[in-house]
Image (cartoon, grey):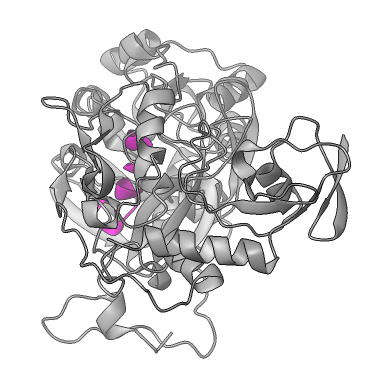
Amino acid sequence: MVTITINGKEVEVPEGSTIIEAFYQNKQDIAHYCWHPGLSIAGVCRLCMVEIEGNPRLQIACNTQVMPGMKVNNQSAKVKDAVKWGLDFHLINHPLDCPICDQAGECGLQDQYMKYGQYDSEMGEGKVKKHKVVDLGPRVVLDSERCILCSRCVRFTDEVSKTNELGIFNRGDRAEVGTFDGKPLNNNYSQNVVDICPVGALTSKDFRFRQRVWFLKDAETICTGCSTGCSVKVYHNKEGLFRVKPVYNPAVNGHWMCDQGRDVYKFVNKDARLLDAKVVSGGKTEHMQATELAKRLGTTLKGAGKSVALVLTGAYTVEEYDAILNYFKSEVQTSNVYHWINNPENFDTFDGLLLRGDRNPNTKGLAEALSKNGFNGTWKELTDGISTGSIKTVVVAGPENIALFPDLKAKVSELARAAKLIWLGAAKSADLEALTGDVALLPTKSYVEKSGTFVNHAGLRQTVKRVTTIVPGALSLTEAVAAMKGEDVLAQPKQQAGVASPTVGAGRVNNEFTLTRGVW
């Protein structure tokens, strides 16, 4: 460790740290744009200026290592003046479109201008007009006028994704970020450049103009798009989830996440969900509360023995597996339990960065639970049992994200050959809706609607907490099992006292901006 002094306070930092790292490790504020802890040092924005005792010239903190006894400050008039004029240069060609900019509310340029700027510009020249709404690829849009050429995005494609689509073209005040001819920004990590853009130059096509960030709440959880289990933050309001961004976790995903993981939220929102419980029998359909259906199923399943089979996917928590396996073992009294492995041909693949072929968040946890309970049935045993009629009822805890199960249609058809099919799942499926036999559908909670534990591919156990409720009345497997046992289950959270439900005018879309602003 090295002892230095930052703004008059003596601190210890690891040997080899840079001054800007020392500032962050000791929660001291310092201006910067181009420095990012996950990328190489460019030193191009010149905003992290510091004054070092004994050195007549200001230095950049991102590319200067600490030395024992070093005394550093970024609060002197000399430093503040340098930062102010640095900001002035960055804003020479930046359009003043903050009211309509999609980055407003989380823009580093706004934040730092308010902290270190707030001056009257002395620039007499007109702003250089650059390209607007540049389509860089399938997921990212560039506004060149807002770009301050920090080069974070270029370094990301060079150093992390190693796809090299981006470069800085032209010189001086005509310089712009762009793609090479015939090589759009089209890799599975492309939206990380949006995360690390410190201004509103790079925006996500999926998120832009859909919500203002100050109307969203956020909460940390993990990505359920594959068995890596990246730490992420989901952004939501009463209309549902709107985006997913990575959270730094050195043990799992570092600073990044893949684009496919960012799409997971789409399968949580209501338009993709199974919303109510129903029973189809004899050509008639009966709708009911999920808890009522679960209690009715419990009466049917109790003591049914080996005529019942359970099929599990790797989408549920450790606690849910424990609950349902214990129930089938002790109450139903069957050992017919099977693991539905999606995309088995790609199950063990890995892209070398984060994305794994096992597109389930908890395959490891399921395997541990099956082994602990002595369940080791094969899929062939299941299909043979259905064919011979020894298995009459199949209960499925199905996938949450059906896009990751390309064999869904075939599996539904295969399992529906049983005399009775009971499907517990979060996703709406046309293949399930089309079944006309003896079928029961019970809506389950998605990963943001419950608390529990997931075990990733490396055996790391990660606990998540409930974020919000998307489908009131849906049950976790644990709650479904409790209801099957005849217990009373409160599936829907109580309405907060004194808070009215949002009202929707006739013919108007329920929109957070226009209908609930100022109410909640």
Give how far across and how far down residue 251 sits, in percent. Answer: 63, 30
> In the image, what residue occupies the spot 27% across and 84% down?
515
Residue 168 x %, y %:
27, 36
The residue nearer to you, when weighing 176 against 319, is: 176
Q: Nearer the viewer, residue 170 or 485?
A: 170
Magenta region: 259-275
Establish if 216 lies above or below 168. below
Does residue 466 appear left or right of residue 57 in this picture? Answer: left
Q: Quadrant of residue 154?
A: top left
Picture residue at 86% right of the left edge, 49% below the top? 11
Q: Name the spot of residue 387 as percent of width and height, x first.
A: 26, 14
**Can residue 111 be seen by looking at this rendering?**
yes
Left or right side of 303 for 501: left
The N terminus sits in image quarter? top right
The kind of secondary structure the magenta stretch mainly shows is helix
User: Left or right of 481: which side holds 93?
Assistant: left
For the C terminus, the quadrant is: bottom left
In the image, residue 341 sits, relative to residue 131, either above or below, namely above
Q: Nearer the viewer, residue 395 or 102?
A: 102
